[in-house]
C-alpha cells in the first residue's frame, strides 16, 4: 500500500495527456483504512466523487453521485449482486476471510461493523451537558511524534476522568497526591468508579508547540498526573514540561509498555468497555477517537489506540479503575479489623 501511494503521488500526476481536462477513475476494493482510496479521501477529497457499493446494503452509507445516481437498494442487508454473490456465498466468504478482510473487500468498510477489538457500541454515551461534579482523579496521557511531516502519525493526547456515582451526601472517596485511596469513617462507596473521556486531540506539532499544547491542556482540565510514553521523543517532551512547568500542580511520569504489542495492550482493557464503565461525550473529537479505536488494527493511524490502552491500563495499575466485583471485595476486606486476627483472646 505504501508503494502504491508513493506511485500515485510521485508518478501518476504527470501521466495525463491534458492535466486541465483529464479525469481520474479509481476502481478498487478496500484493503485497509490507509489504502489508496483512504489516502485520497483523507488528503485529496476535494473534486472527487466517492461511490461505495457494499455487498450488503447499509442505509447509513447510501451514496449519491454527482450525476444524480444513487444505490437503488432500500432494505438493510439487501444484496448488491445476488446472482453472483448469494447470501449463502457471502456467509461462507465471511467465515473464510474473517471479519476484517470481509469488511474491507465485501462491505468496502475496512473494519467490522460496530468495531474490531473495541466495538463502537461499547462506549457509553455521556448525555449530560456538564461533566460530573465530583471527579476523583484526572489523568492525561500523551503519545508523542513531534514532526510536521504528513507521512508520520500525529502526536495525540487524551484526558481521562475517574468519577464515582453521584451521591447526594458528598464525597465517597478521598485520594492523596499519588492517587492512593485514603479511608475515613463511612466514606467508602458501594459502587465501582466510572471513567470518562474528558478530552482528546491529535495534531502534527514540532517540539515547542507540542510541549505548550500538552501543558495548556493539563492546566485547562486540571490534570493530576500526566503520563507520556517512554520513547525518545516522549522523554524529550517530559523533560521540557518538567523544566518549563515545574510550578504547575500536575505530575509528569513516563510509561513503559514493555514488550507487549499494540493489540495485546488493547485486549488487556477490552473487558472494561464490555462491562460498560467507559463513557465518552457526544462531540466530534470523541467520535474520531471511537472510530479510530474501532478500526484498529486496520486503521490508518493508531495514536488514539495507544492512548486508550495506556490511559486505562495506568488507571488500573493505580487501583483507581476497579470493576464492581473488585469494589465489593475491597469493601468487605475493609470491614475486617486487620490486626492479630489469628491470636486467641486469652493466652493458653
Image (spheres, rainbow, N blue to C red):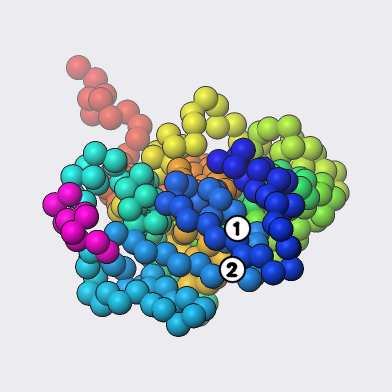
Q: Nearer the viewer, residue 27 or 196?
A: 27
Q: Classify 103 as above or below 219.
A: above
Task: Give the residue at x 73% y 63%.
Answer: 19
Query: Marks 2 and 1: CB-CB under 8 Å?
Result: yes
User: x and y percent of residue 54 in the render?
Assistant: 34, 61
Q: Which residue is mark 1?
A: 40
Report whether residue 201 is seen: no
Relative to 92, is 259 on the left or the right? right
Q: Is residue 213 magenta?
A: no
The residue positioned farthest toward the front in the image shown: 17
User: x and y percent of residue 185 in the render?
Assistant: 41, 56
Report whether residue 348 is seen: yes
Q: Secondary structure at mark 1?
A: helix
User: x and y percent of residue 250 in the render?
Assistant: 70, 52
Q: Which residue is mark 2?
A: 48
Task: Give the residue at x 47% y 47%.
Answer: 32
Q: Secondary structure at mark 2?
A: loop
The residue positioned farthest toward the bottom in the image shown: 68
Q: Which residues are magenta?
A: 80-89
Q: Nearer the viewer, residue 121 or 180?
A: 121
Task: Give the residue at x 19% y 61%.
Answer: 82
User: x and y percent of residue 107 in the render?
Assistant: 34, 57
Displayed quadrant of residue 137 = bottom right
Residue 147's label in the rendered image is: none
Task: Give the residue at x 42% y 73%.
Answer: 63
Relative to 209, is 171 on the left or the right? left
Q: Main secondary structure of the magenta part?
A: loop
Amino acid at each position: 500500500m505504501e508503494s502504491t501511494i508513493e506511485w500515485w503521488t510521485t508518478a501518476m500526476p504527470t501521466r495525463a495527456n491534458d492535466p486541465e481536462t483529464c479525469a481520474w477513475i479509481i476502481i478498487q476494493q478496500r484493503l485497509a483504512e490507509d489504502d489508496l482510496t483512504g489516502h485520497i479521501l483523507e488528503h485529496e477529497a476535494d473534486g472527487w466523487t466517492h461511490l461505495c457499493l457494499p455487498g450488503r446494503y447499509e442505509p447509513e452509507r447510501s451514496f449519491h453521485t454527482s450525476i444524480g445516481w444513487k444505490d437503488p437498494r432500500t432494505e438493510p442487508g439487501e444484496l448488491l449482486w445476488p446472482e453472483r454473490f448469494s447470501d449463502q456465498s457471502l456467509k461462507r466468504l465471511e467465515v473464510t476471510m474473517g471479519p476484517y478482510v470481509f469488511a474491507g473487500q465485501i462491505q468496502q468498510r475496512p473494519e467490522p461493523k460496530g468495531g474490531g477489538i473495541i466495538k463502537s457500541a461499547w462506549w457509553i454515551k455521556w448525555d449530560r451537558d456538564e461533566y460530573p461534579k465530583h471527579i476523583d482523579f484526572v489523568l492525561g496521557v500523551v503519545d508523542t511524534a513531534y514532526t510536521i511531516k504528513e507521512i508520520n502519525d500525529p502526536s495525540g493526547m487524551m484526558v481521562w476522568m475517574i468519577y464515582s456515582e453521584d451521591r447526594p451526601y458528598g464525597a465517597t472517596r478521598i485520594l492523596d497526591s499519588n492517587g492512593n485511596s485514603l479511608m475515613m469513617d463511612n466514606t467508602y462507596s458501594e459502587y465501582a468508579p466510572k471513567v470518562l473521556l474528558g478530552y482528546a486531540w491529535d495534531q502534527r506539532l514540532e517540539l515547542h508547540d507540542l510541549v505548550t499544547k500538552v501543558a495548556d491542556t493539563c492546566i485547562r482540565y486540571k490534570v493530576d498526573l500526566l503520563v507520556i510514553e517512554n520513547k525518545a521523543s516522549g522523554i524529550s517532551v517530559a523533560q521540557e514540561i518538567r523544566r518549563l512547568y515545574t510550578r504547575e500542580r500536575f505530575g509528569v511520569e513516563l510509561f513503559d509498555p514493555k514488550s507487549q504489542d499494540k493489540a495485546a495492550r488493547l485486549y488487556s482493557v477490552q473487558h472494561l468497555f464490555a462491562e460498560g464503565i467507559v463513557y465518552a461525550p457526544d462531540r466530534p473529537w470523541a467520535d474520531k477517537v471511537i472510530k479510530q479505536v474501532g478500526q484498529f488494527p486496520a486503521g490508518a493511524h493508531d495514536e488514539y489506540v495507544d492512548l486508550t490502552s495506556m490511559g486505562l491500563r495506568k488507571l488500573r495499575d493505580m487501583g483507581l479503575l476497579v470493576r464492581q466485583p473488585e469494589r465489593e471485595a475491597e469493601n468487605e476486606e475493609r470491614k475486617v479489623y486487620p490486626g492479630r486476627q489469628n491470636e486467641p483472646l486469652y493466652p493458653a
